[in-house]
């Protein structure tokens, strides 16, 4: 039932303001953001790290906020209720509303638990605007970005908005790393 309400809300909100996750992500590329993986204490709900700072997860968090979805709150509430289902990579014994939503493995778990996971393929047409993609950059380093409604120079792939160290940018990088997660919330 919660999933149906969430989908109806997202559809209504998108139609009412014309904003999509893809549009929101593209808008983020207009802002100067310095890559900063620091821990920040932030308000809850609706908290954000300082303007002009961020990492890859902050791109996703900020894009979702622009369409009316607070991943800080959503992930925190799901982790409180289902903490044992989330990764224990960081040695935490409980949730932390300041950082949990800013960790790629937690977002992957949340999206999977909500039924948004879809098949990973090497076919670029399977990745549509608004999709969320996660990669393994090597070792235990994970990354996340948003597929947007702009195409690569050759017209074969949708571009990605992400922050891999150079700020919130638009790049043709869908298959540059091993894809480990593919999610669609619409």
Image: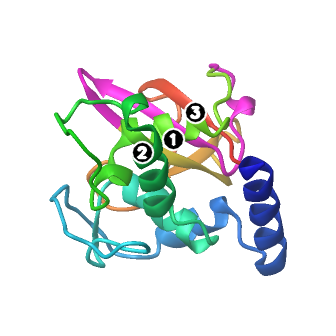
Residue 155, image quadrant: top right
First-in-chain label (2 vs 1):
2
How far apart are labels 3 and 2 at the CA level?
13 Å
Q: How many numbered marks appear?
A: 3
First-in-chain label (3 vs 2):
2
Magenta-tinted stretch = 121-142
Q: Nearer the viewer, mark 3 or mark 2?
A: 2
Q: How is the image coloured?
A: rainbow
Confirm whether residue 163 shows in the render. no
Please state the horizontal and vertical placement of residue 88, each as a whole percent of the image: 26, 30
How far apart are labels 2 and 1 at the CA level?
8 Å
Mark 2: which secondary structure? helix
How far apart are labels 3 and 1 at the CA level?
5 Å
Q: Is residue 132 magenta?
A: yes
Q: Which residue is mark 3?
A: 112
Please state the horizontal and vertical placement of residue 23, each as a whole percent of the image: 65, 66
Q: Crowding near pointer 2: few (<14 within 10 Å), some, many (20+)?
A: many
Q: Nearer the viewer, mark 2 or mark 1?
A: 2
Please state the horizontal and vertical placement of residue 111, each as a whole percent of the image: 56, 40
Label 2 close to label 1 by CB (< 8 Å): yes
56 or 114: nearer the viewer: 114
In this rendering, position of residue 42 left or right of residue 147 = left
In this rendering, position of residue 185 left or right of residue 109 = right
Q: Which residue is mark 2?
A: 79
In this rendering, position of residue 78 left or right of residue 47 = right
Q: Which residue is mark 1?
A: 110
Label 3 close to label 1 by CB (< 8 Å): yes
Residue 6, image quadrant: bottom right
Residue 37, image quadrant: bottom left
Residue 168 vertical position relative to residue 78 in the rendered view, above or below: below
């Amino acid at each position: 039932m919660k999933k149906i309400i969430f989908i109806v809300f997202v559809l209504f909100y998108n139609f009412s303001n014309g904003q999509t996750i893809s549009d929101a992500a593209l808008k983020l590329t207009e802002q100067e953001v310095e890559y900063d993986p620091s821990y920040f204490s932030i308000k809850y709900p609706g908290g954000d790290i300082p303007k002009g700072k961020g990492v890859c997860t902050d791109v996703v968090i900020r894009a979702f906020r622009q369409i009316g979805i607070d991943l800080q709150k959503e992930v925190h509430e799901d982790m409180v209720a289902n903490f044992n289902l989330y990764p224990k990579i960081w040695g935490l014994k409980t949730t932390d509303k300041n950082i949990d939503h800013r960790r790629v493995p937690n977002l992957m778990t949340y999206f999977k638990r909500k039924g948004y996971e879809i098949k990973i393929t090497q076919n670029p047409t399977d990745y549509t605007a608004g999709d969320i993609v996660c990669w393994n950059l090597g070792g235990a380093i994970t990354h996340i970005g948003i597929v947007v409604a702009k195409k690569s120079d050759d017209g074969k792939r949708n571009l990605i908005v992400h922050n891999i160290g150079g700020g919130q940018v638009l790049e043709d990088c869908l298959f540059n790393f091993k894809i480990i997660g593919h999610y669609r919330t619409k």
